[in-house]
Image (tube, helix red, strand yellow):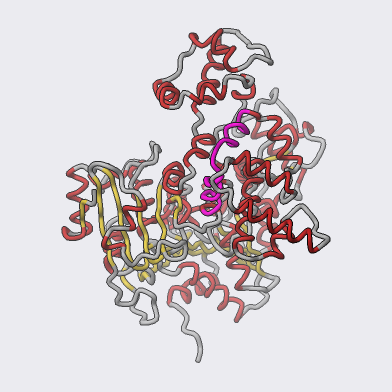
Amino acid sequence: MMKEVEPEVSKALEYAQTGRDFLMQGGAGSGKTYSMLSFLEELYASHPQTSVACVTFTNVAVNEIRSRFSTPVLSVSTIHEFLWALIGRFQKNIRESLATLVNEGVIKSALDLPISAGFWDESITYKEWLSLEAGEISHDELLKVAKHLFSEHPTLTKILSDQYDVLLIDEYQDTPVDVLSILLDTLPEPKDRSLRIGFFGDGEQAIHEGEKGQAVVKSAVASGRLHLITKDQNRRNPATVLSVINRLRADGLVQVQATDMNAPNFNKEGTARFVYTEHNELNTDELRNLEFCSDWGFSSEDTKLLYLGKSMIAREKQFPRLMAIYDKDRVVEYSKKLKDALVKRGISPNDDATFSEVIELHGSIAPPTKGQKEAFDNEPDLLALASPFLFTDITTTSSNSDRLLGTKKVSELDYRDRGEKRDPLINHLIAIQELRALFRQGRFSAVIRAMDETITSIEGRERVAIDLNTLDSMSDSSIGDVIAFSESSGLLKRKDAVLRFQENHPYRNARVSAVPFQEIVNLYEYVEDHSPYSTQHGVKGSEWDNIFVSLDNGGWNNYNFERLLSDPQGNSSVHNRSRMMLYVTCSRAKENLIVYIHKPTEATLARAREWFGDTNVSLVG
């Protein structure tokens, strides 16, 4: 029996084969990625030698698409990998472009200007970080250089067309505006090139790139440069959830439940509830005890608890002390504030001056802020701990939660190095917990491979088993004690990078060492996706049976869910970001949805009753 081809896919093939570019737009759960894969299957079935570049937003999506197709004429990559593969060999032009963009201030630099292309002796390289002096550019600079090269050198368009017959952009709404401008403004009209371009995605889920890219795409559709194909069927969400998310779209598309009996949501009613608290905020234990959550599994496989801010997850997942150290260390904040004040007055403390000495001499110049003073009053040990450390050590300590969290695992197809952003100390602690996890799972061969010590005798194996049992019992011990035991037992010794970090950042090391190791256990469960917690940004493209969405702004000024619910017709950038974020999170639910807010206004509750129904709005605490 032949596989039935979706009418939207047939239309896309028709456009591509008749020299036209297209945009396949569909709401959440409409199967856009499925349609893109079907497009590829049909294209290769009739034209197996067609050279296709498929560009997508995440490494996870790249790995998923690669797992479906093995043909050598298909290239799958992220947008940055795609651009660098295209322009990276043209080093002379890259250096010229980079020098121009730096001189014009498009790329910010502390270099003495102007500079010329000859400033760099070696090749320009693409890295995760920016170091213009060393000729290393990062993601943002790559986009600017690529856009400049395409505008200055039309030959690049021919090179692109010579290399590929078809270019597919998955999740186009996440594509940086510079890239959309290249494809829709800089490249010649479709009739003047052989390359065909197809976009797949949903403009109502532009939570990463925002509205600028959408304006470029809408203009291309309006001018006829892009031919719009719309998918209105939803194969994921039950009827109650679909009713809610349809109210959040602003583009006129009304999704309907799939008519295909094989669709996961066929004739499924599901539940969608709005709950709120008036006194204390709802925590996970209380959520578990709600009657309508009695059948939720609360595992990472079937449930996701979504918060906007990482600090909320840290509190719920119980690594709040680590998050406070890395994200908002009040001593570091205050030290940097004081240093700035001293610089303005031309005062430079001695390199060997301690924190307490600088405070004693100059503290009156810049007293702590209200928030810093409250932190010091609530935790007087913060100042006492910092006192003996060098002032320069504390002022050069970073405040960045990525140094703690790294990159969270989001799928079994996520093959990235998720520790690339973490500092060496946290990576070492995650490695210790990985060793404990392997031991608890009974994977002794994997434990041996992960250890630093080589076992050469039966007695040695017995001793290691004893040491592993001891390490396994140290969850309540301090991080410092666990590091020391792992070192002395030979289970896992500190690498040079860890030793350098501890030597160069003694204040940060001291703070982390005092935290109970249980917070590392909880951190490991979160970053390895063994827990149901996630940020709202991190779940687009995924789905779970049960979704809990917390409408907490997380300290972000560019989101305001109260204002969104009070006035859904608003059109500010904050309003649109909030609307799209709520649309994305609610549309992950395959069975049950709960949206939660603390201390809502009457206007918010009125809107919730309108959207969810009176009987589905509940006060739960």
Could you tell me residue 183's position as x and y percent? 56, 54
Determine which quarter of the picture holds residue 506: top right
Determine which quarter of the picture holds residue 513: top right
Could you tell me residue 435's position as x and y percent? 65, 55
Q: Which residues are magenta?
A: 507-525
Residue at point 55%, 50% (across, down): 521
Could you tell me residue 318's position as x and y percent? 46, 46
From the viewer's side, name the closer residue of 279 and 463: 463
| Residue sitting farthest toward the bottom | 1
Image height of 473 relative to 377, above or below: below
Image height of 484 relative to 40, above or below: above
> Is residue 342 part of the magenta span, yes or no?
no
Relative placement, left or right, of 486 versus 546 is right
Residue at point 41%, 44% (across, down): 312
Could you tell me residue 99's position as x and y percent? 70, 33
Residue at point 24%, 41% (across, down): 279
Image height of 535 relative to 480, above or below: below
From the viewer's side, name the closer residue of 460 and 373: 460
| Residue 151 is at least partly visible in this image | no
From the viewer's side, name the closer residue of 436 and 564: 436
| Residue 225 is at least partly visible in this image | yes
Q: Main secondary structure of the magenta part?
A: helix
From the viewer's side, name the closer residue of 546 and 568: 546
Number of numbered discs: 0
> Is residue 520 part of the magenta span, yes or no?
yes
Relative placement, left or right, of 475 versus 605 is right
Relative placement, left or right, of 608 versus 345 is left
Residue at point 33%, 78% (across, down): 259
